[in-house]
Image (cartoon, rainbow, N blue to C red):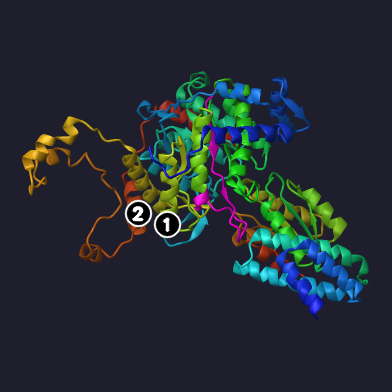
Amino acid sequence: MSDLQAITETLITGDGDKLKELVQAAVDAGVPANEILQKGLIVGMDIVGEKMESGDMFIPEVLMSAKAMSISVEILKPLLAEGESSSAGKVVIGTVKGDLHDIGKNLVVMMMESAGFEVIDLGVDVDPAKFVEAIKENKPNVVGLSALLTTTMPMMKKSIQGIEESGLRDSLKIIVGGAPVNKAFADEIGADGYAPDAGSASKMAKAMNG
Amino acid sequence: MYDRMQELTTAQMTQIHQASMAILKTSGIVINEEQALSIFKQHGYKVEGKTVFPTEEQIRKALSTVPSQFTIKARNPAKDVTIGEDSFAFLPGYGAPFVMTSEGEQREATMTDYDAFCKLIHTSKYLDMNGWMMVEPSDIPAETAHMDMMLSNMLLCDKPFMGSPASRQGALDGIEMAGILFGGKDKIIDQPVSISLINSLSPLQFSDEMLASLIELASHGQACIVASLIMAGASGPVTLAGVLAMQNAEILTGIALSQLVREGVPVVYGSTSSAMDMKTGALTIGAPELSKNINYTAQMARFYNVPSRSGGGLTDSLYPDAQAGAESALALYTAARNGVNVILHACGILGSYIAMSFQKFIIDEEVCGMVRQMLKPIDITEESIDTEMICEVGPGGQYLTHPKTFKLCRTEFYLPNLMARSNYDSWSAGGKKKIHDLADDKVSQRLAKYEKPDIDPAIEVELTEYVNKRKNG
């Protein structure tokens, strides 16, 4: 359908205003909201994701597309039927206690939202109790822990321990990331996965969600 | 002198300065530490919540008491280091959690690695100072690692060293130990024996542990580098001009705090800002943008008449290969040539700061030597020109056997320790070794020949006891 193709193509260019117009036009023309979402927008973001991995699209361009998408999704949300959610799952994410760095984490949030996840971003300097509280409240499928400082990496372990102690560990998957983090560390502290960048974090979350 | 690298005009630097003042006035800097906030308040700085808004007058007053040159004392007086104006120092890599092995494996660093670096630094012809946390040892308890590192700094090497800025307690432990080493804390308060790295948190913030460390170090008269590392396009503006204005605002605020804590304490204007890689969102330190920033940072520091810190042998390559060589040499040379005073990360660091390489350390050392030589002026005198000799030898003559060549053959030129100069047959017969292989051989040779510098045994005992007591409670 050429309406949907135009939507996909415009999403890739990152023109948020034009995308909004096209999405509204499609809605007005009677195209089902879920079809616009899945076959127009999400198809577009998948292409953006591929282009990001191949280096054809740069991060600021990817984020511009993600921003355009999220504005358009807001138009569609009230029109989606029950069960036809825009949600690929729920993610709770934060930078662990003692660490104020968030650029990488913010990239992960953007990529996951673009992949259709509902992301609860707890920000920075998040203590284990706050993670547990957010998990209880939101019941996420995936929890993401980020750290840039080697001195705060032990806090990742403590955060996982906190989740274990609260009895919530089995209900979710935990992904860790950050410049000094690697797979060996992730395995050591009992995380379910390690992602070296935002794109793979998003893919991993999708895969973990089944 | 003709220089193709951009020389900022006074008008341009003034414009950057004024932009920084506007940023400080409108946005301010967030100070995430109680004592720092009260120090600002006590001195009449405008503080709202956690944000301080320094005025131009307050900044200028602070700058007026910063020394343009100072000396960091070593426990071996022959190795004191002067920082500022024309004096500069090469310091080793800093803060790497990993080591890149010669086989291309990235492994966690250990205390043995840390000690090995101390030994290489002690025996280095071209590194002027020991550093701090050249690698982060993963095999010792993190809460007390700073004391193990400080002990190694003090016992294994007699050059001046960098201090511990990871926490208030860490800074204090470093100061206590320095007091033991130099015969009392009163001996070091007006004569710094260390310089420590205090980083801002861009954009426009300082974290609590950095502020607390700055306060403790400055109040004990120890030098600090106040440094900003902006990732252009991520934690700061995408344009370098914007980065300059923003980092300037951050750095000047940190400098102001140091002078409020202790007027006249030596402080260094630092930046290693660089580009964000647009494809990955990661920091790139091998980028030309980094060397451009080195050039501008040096000039902005001179604009304020304070010493500068920037540069180093910086590369994104994960292995000491051609990329590492090219990127590192460009950044290192730019820093030295453009007047940076503290050249941290001069040796060993790679992978965008993630790892240290022993081989690269040796290679970078050689480049430091080459750079020093490049910057060493020649004498233009009758003797050094020697027209008499030139006319004597005459057309078609030769200088190989001339007495003057004989006299100066060991001192006139740079003598490389590492860079290979060979012909194909010899190189082939020797196994076609590449420079990183040659560097590898040198590492073991240097460590084998290392001798621990003498120290008063009573001081060594006292230092070791201090560390043990603090570790075991």
Left or right for B439, reference A174:
left
Task: Tell me if I can see residue A56 in this picture.
Answer: yes
Query: Is residue B278 shown in magenta?
Result: yes
**Which quadrant, please, contains the N terminus of chain A?**
bottom right
Q: What residue type is labelled 1?
A: Pro
The chain under label 1 reads B
Which residue was labeled with disc 1? B320
Q: Tell me: residue B251, above or below residue B110.
A: above
The chain under label 2 reads B
The magenta-colored residue range is B265-289
- Indicate which label's residue lies in the foreground, 2 or 1: 1
Secondary structure at badge 2 equals helix
Which residue was labeled with disc 2? B439
Q: Is the magenta stretch mostly helix, strand or loop?
A: loop
Where is residue B205 drawn, in percent x and y? 68, 38
**Circles 2 and 1: CB atoms closer than 8 Å:** yes
Left or right for B407, reference A159:
left
Q: Quadrant of residue B126?
A: top left
Where is residue B342 drawn, in percent x and y? 46, 36
Left or right for B193, reference B387:
right
Q: What residue type is labelled 2?
A: Ala
Give the Cα distance between marks 2 and 1.
10 Å
Where is residue B239 drawn, in percent x and y? 61, 48
Q: Tell me: residue B218, above or below residue A193.
A: above
